[in-house]
């Protein structure tokens, strides 16, 4: 009886978690520069990711939680950000006549959605709502690796015996392995401004890097502050130890 009990406990804590771990291991894991306690974003990668978002992703997806002024973190100057923001039209108002109007974007504005509202977006995609990308990497478990795997995981034809409805695509990394979104990226989908080879892997890596920054733009400052606090606590602990040791040495005398 005791042996059975321990076998059940062992299975629950070791075998079952390993089944889920095996599924997670199937993702294409990348060495993201922003991971770990010393993780940092790479500005060149972020700028390429922004280019991908602007030329590919923004046609269907918005980023309503990201403001233009935050592009300072990517190395852009205030002047460049102002010029970039002005390329967008922002619905504002009402004015003194009670009417809504369009104006050029400002650095304080958020990225513009391609649709006026959620209903319009659904109508354009046959009832499916294209998600906002602002927090996507944080909303999905193991977000960066999952999104990278999804973007690079499209297959031209499904395995033998797998039935695929017209208008749908086979992707083993998507839930159910069938996805309505066509492959958004492919080799040379865009021409990088900096001349980097725009392979599918590179495009996918860069856009995921950008999306993770969009979801957590203050990551570097947070980690830097955390390290400073940790260093302070270590120094404080050593000082307290030395002080207490000196105090007790005097008491013992």
Image (spheres, rainbow, N blue to C red):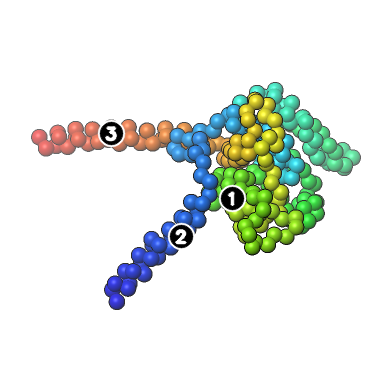
Q: CA distance from mark 3 to mark 2?
A: 44 Å
Q: Quadrant of residue 69?
A: top right
Q: CA distance from mark 3 to mark 1?
A: 40 Å
Q: Nearer the viewer, mark 3 or mark 2?
A: 2
Q: CA distance from mark 1 to mark 2?
A: 23 Å
The label on residue 238 is 3
Residue 153 image position (x, y, % from top left) = 61, 48
> Please, what secondary structure does the residue beneath circle 2 have?
helix
Q: Residue at x 67, y 50 (%)?
A: 156
Residue 133 image position (x, y, % from top left) = 66, 45
Q: Quadrant of residue 244?
A: top left
The label on residue 19 is 2
Residue 144 image position (x, y, % from top left) = 56, 44
Query: Sequence-wise, which precedes: disc 1 or disc 2?
Result: 2
> Please, what secondary structure does the residue beneath circle 3 have?
helix
Q: Is residue 179 above or below residue 41?
A: below
């Amino acid at each position: 009886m005791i042996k059975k009990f321990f076998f059940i406990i062992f299975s629950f804590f070791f075998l079952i978690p390993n089944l889920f771990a095996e599924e997670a291991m199937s993702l294409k894991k990348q060495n993201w520069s922003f991971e770990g306690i010393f993780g940092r974003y790479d500005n060149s990668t972020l700028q390429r990711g922004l280019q991908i978002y602007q030329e590919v992703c923004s046609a269907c997806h918005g980023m309503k939680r990201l403001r233009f002024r935050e592009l300072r973190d990517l190395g852009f100057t205030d002047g460049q950000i102002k010029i970039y923001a002005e390329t967008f039209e922002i619905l504002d108002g009402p004015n003194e006549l009670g009417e809504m109007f369009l104006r050029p974007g400002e650095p304080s504005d958020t990225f513009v959605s391609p649709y006026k509202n959620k209903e319009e977006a659904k109508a354009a995609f046959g009832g499916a709502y294209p998600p906002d990308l602002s927090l996507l990497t944080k909303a999905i478990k193991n977000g960066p690796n999952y999104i990278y795997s999804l973007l690079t995981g499209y297959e031209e034809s499904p395995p033998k015996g797998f039935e695929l409805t017209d208008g749908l695509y086979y992707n083993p990394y998507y839930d159910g392995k069938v996805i309505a979104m066509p492959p958004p990226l492919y080799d040379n989908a865009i021409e990088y401004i900096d001349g980097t080879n725009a392979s599918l892997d590179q495009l996918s890596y860069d856009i995921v890097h950008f999306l993770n920054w969009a979801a957590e733009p203050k990551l570097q400052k947070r980690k830097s502050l955390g390290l400073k606090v940790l260093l302070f606590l270590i120094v404080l602990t050593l000082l307290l130890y030395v002080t207490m040791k000196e105090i007790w040495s005097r008491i013992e005398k």
